[in-house]
Image (cartoon, rainbow, N blue to C red):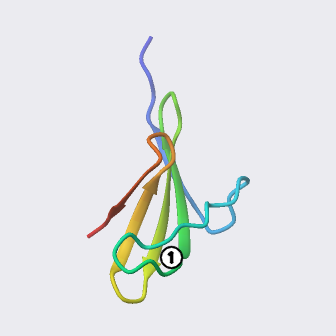
């Protein structure tokens, strides 16, 4: 069976709220921007954040990893 790729869903009000995270660079709270839900199975979720001092970050829900984004 062929998997069909899911069209990404962009939202700023996801069913499950984004986690409250601190910036790994300066330890200030990150500001939540949006969530993207996509993928086949399992469905992937990315939460996008921003730090006023250090720039944008993305949090991948499946791996629970926060990394700087371009």
Q: Furthest-top residue in view?
A: 1
Q: Furthest-front residue in view?
A: 27
- Along the line of sight, which residue is nearer the eye, 3 or 12? 12
- Along the line of sight, which residue is nearer the eye, 42 or 67? 67
Q: Secondary structure at mark 1?
A: loop
- The quarter of the image holding the C terminus is bottom left
Up/down of 55 relative to 34, above or below: below
Q: Furthest-right residue in view?
A: 15
Give me the residue at 53% from left, 78% from top.
29
Up/down of 4 relative to 57, above or below: above
Instruction: Give residue 53's position: percent from left, percent from top.
Output: 36, 88
Instruction: Give residue 69's position: percent from left, percent from top.
Output: 31, 66
Q: Furthest-bottom residue in view?
A: 52
| Classed neighbour count for the residue bearing mark 1: other residues with Cα under 10 Å, few (<14), some (14–19), many (≥20) | many
- The quarter of the image holding the N terminus is top left
Instruction: Give residue 19's position: percent from left, percent from top.
Output: 61, 60
Per the image, the residue denoted by label 1 is: 30
Relative horizontal placement of residue 20, taking residue 7 as reference (left or right): right
Which image quarter: residue 23?
bottom left
Give me the residue at 34% from left, 75% from top.
25
Which image quarter: residue 27?
bottom left
């Amino acid at each position: 069976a062929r998997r069909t790729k899911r069209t990404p869903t962009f939202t700023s009000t996801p069913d499950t709220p984004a986690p409250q995270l601190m910036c790994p660079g300066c330890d200030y709270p990150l500001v939540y921007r949006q969530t993207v839900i996509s993928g086949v199975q399992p469905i992937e979720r990315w939460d996008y954040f921003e730090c006023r001092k250090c720039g944008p970050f993305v949090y991948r829900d499946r791996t629970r990893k926060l990394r700087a984004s371009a």
